[in-house]
Image: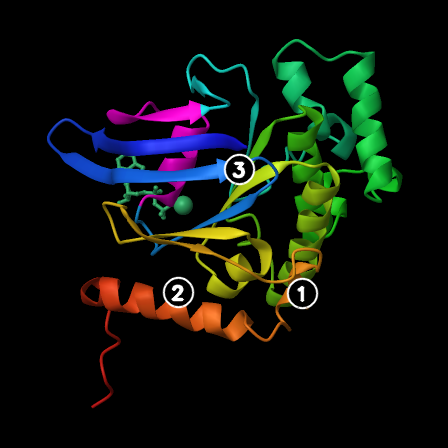
Amino acid sequence: MTLLELKNVCFSYHSKDAETVAVDNVSFSVDEGEFVGIIGPSGCGKTTILNLLAGIYAPASGTIILNGKSASESTSKIGLMPQRDQLFPWRTIESNVLLGPELLGRKNKANKKRASLLLRKYGLSDFAKKYPSELSGGMRQRSALIRTLVMDPDILLLDEPFSALDFQTRIVVCDDVHRIIKQEKKTAVIVSHDINECVSLCDKIVILSRRPAHVLETIEIDLNKSASPLQRRECRDFPGYFKRIWKLLEDKNERCTTKIPEKT
Ligand code: ADP
Ligand code: MG
C-alpha cells in the first residue's frame, strides 16, 4: 500500500532580491514498510524535500499525499530525525527522549513507559540518567532515533543520520538503525550522499540531479531483504548498484563537479 506520494512537487526559497529554485517537479512514492533512499549531490535539495514531507514547508506547486489525504489534512504522524543528533547536552538521555511529548504537552504515563521500554529494548536503560556527553556517538544516534520513535510516527524521515560518525561506527550504527526501524515496523525515508550506505539500507533509491533537484531515476534495490545492511554489502549484485548510481550521478552532474586543480 502506498503511504506517501509526491506528485510534481516544486519549491523555491525567496529572499528580498533572489529566488532559489530548490525542487523541480519531483515525483516518487513510498510504500508502507518500505525503506526509501534519496541520494544526490550536496546542495541539490535533499533536506528541502524532507522538510516538505515533514510539512515544515508547503510545495509551491504539486501535491504530497499522505495515507490517501493531502499532507495538510492527514492525521498520519511524521518523525523527522535531523542531520546531527541534536540532543540537548543539559538534559539526561531519558529527558531528551521525552522532549517530543513534553513540547506537545502530552508527557504522560503511557509515553514515559514507551520511552523506558524503547530504551531498555535497545540497550540504553543503563544510560537513561546520563548526559549525551557521557555516551558514544553511536549511542547518541540511537537515543535520537528513540526520541523520534517515542512519538510513534507512521513514517520516519532521516536526514544524513550517520554523517557525524566515523566510518566504522557509521557501519555499525547503520545496522542498528535499520534493525530498530524494521523491528518497530516503520516506514522510512533516508537522505544520504553515500551511495554504498544507501544501497545497503534501502529497498528503493530516488536519485536526484544537482539543484534544482529533479528525479534522474528511481532504482529498485533487489538485494536480500532479510539481511542486515552490512551483510547486503557482501551480496553479489551490490557493486553493480553502486556503479550504476555512480555513473548516473557522474554523467548527469559532470558539469557541476569541482575539478581539483592539477599540481604544476
Ligand atoms: P541538500 O540537503 O541536498 O544539501 P538543501 O535542501 O539543504 O540541500 O538546499 C538546497 C538549496 O537550497 C541549496 O542551494 C541551499 O543553499 C538552498 N537553501 C537551503 N535552505 C535555504 C534557505 N532557508 N533560504 C535560501 N536558500 C536555501
Ligand atoms: Mg542536507
Extent of the magenta region: 45-65
Amino acid on which the number 3 mark rests in the picture = Asp
Residue 121 x, y percent position in the rendering: 85, 39
- Residue 78 visible, this angle: yes
Check residue 31 in the rendering and tell me which mark sits there, or answer none. 3
Query: Which mark is nearer the camera, 2 or 3?
Result: 3
Q: Position of residue 47 (x, y in %)?
A: 40, 40
Q: Please, which residue is most extreme toward the front here?
A: 1
Q: Assign a secondary structure to mark 2.
A: helix
Which residue matches tag 2?
245
Q: Amino acid at mark 1?
A: Leu
* Residue 64 quadrant: top left
Q: Kindly tell me whether mark 2's CB lies below 8 Å from ligand 1.
A: no
Q: Name the quadrant of the N terminus.
A: top right
Q: Is the C-beta separation of discs 1 and 3 under 8 Å?
A: no
- At 43% from the left edge and 57% from the top edge, which residue is drawn? 193
Q: Is mark 3 within 8 Å of ligand 1?
A: no
Which amino acid does the dot numbered 2 rest on?
Ile
Residue matched to label 1 = 230
Residue 50 falls inside the magenta stretch? yes
Give the Cα distance between marks 1 and 3.
23 Å
10 Å crowding of disc 3: few (<14), some (14-19), many (20+)? some
